[in-house]
Image: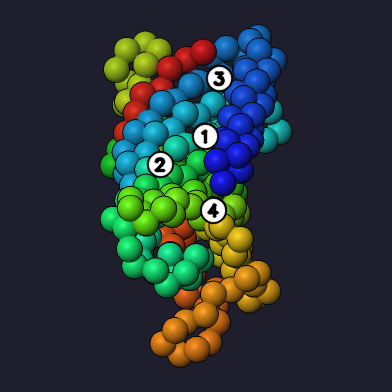
Amino acid sequence: MLHTTTNTHIKYYFILLLIGISLSSIAQEQTKFKEKTDFQFTAGLNRGFGLGVNLLFNDPAKEFPLDIRLGLGYTWLKPGSSSAARKIFINNASNGVPEEKGHNIDLRLDFLKKITILDNQDSYGYFGPRYSSFKGNFKYVGGNEDFDITTKQYGLGAGIESRYNISSNVKLVVSAGLDYFFDAKLQGHDTSYSPNNDNTNARTNNTTDEQFRYKDADKAIDQPGFMPRIMFGVQMDL
């Protein structure tokens, strides 16, 4: 279990490193258009408390009418019901004191169109695809069980954003939006549940003597679904 968790962490760090290198390379390619490339740092509510970094390309091409934004976010989330997670993914034991924690790493691509909101002409509507990597950890102190539930999902998002000048190259950013992530396989320990119920090592519900199904796992685990976002931050010229 420890070896698997360590490998998972290494994989996440490697993905983040590649993303960072890619964003850095893009920024370097844009050096001759410095006035068109901006960096954003945001914080706020993304169902849980979240942080985000964005690289924004204004007017990326003369023939393309939209701005483009690449983003990376990290959100702390409540992972779900510890008792239900244990029954559905491990066993029906009830010993131990449960401890739980969860987080979500999301990648986003936005296309932005300039609009006016409340007389602010530096406002935008945006939309684009999303990717999410969620992990919930459930630990039972005294019960000798510590396991992760993970899922990787694709989604879509949209919202609005306004910017307010603080100085010549720094702006306050206020953004509100909604992301939606599609159902995907939930897996933990040696068990997995898929939306089409092609499940692996599904546990048995002692109440009905029937195997748990994806809808049961989906109800027990609070992986991303609808994710309302209210974010505040700063934007700086690169």
The residue pinned by badge 1 equals 72
Amino acid on which disc 2 is placed: Thr
Q: Earlier in the sequence, mark 4 or mark 1?
A: 1
Mark 4 belongs to which amino acid? Thr
Task: Give the residue type that dot 1 points to.
Answer: Leu
Number of numbered discs:
4
Disc 2 and disc 1 in contact, CB within 8 angstroms: no
Q: Residues within 10 Å of mark 3 (few under 14, many from 20)?
A: many
**In this figure, which residue is indicated by the disc labeled 3?**
37
Marks 3 and 1, how far apart in space? 16 Å
Question: Residue sitting at 33 percent across and 50 percent down?
Answer: 141
Residue 151 appears anywhere in the view: yes
- Estimate the x, y position of residue 138 in percent, counting from the top left: 41, 53
Q: Residues within 10 Å of mark 4 (few under 14, many from 20)?
A: many
In primary-sequence order, the first of circles 3 and 1 is 3
In this rendering, position of residue 79 left or right of residue 69: left
Question: Going 43% across and 44% down the picture, which residue do you hit?
Answer: 103
Q: Residue at x 56, y 57 (%)?
A: 189
Among numbered discs 4 and 3, the one appearing first in the sequence: 3
| Residue at the spot of label 4 | 150
The first of marks 3 and 2 along the sequence is 3
Amino acid type, mark 3: Thr
Label number found at residue 171: none
Q: CA distance from mark 2 to mark 1?
A: 10 Å
- Identify which residue, 158 or 19, lies in the foreground: 19
Residue tagged 2: 75
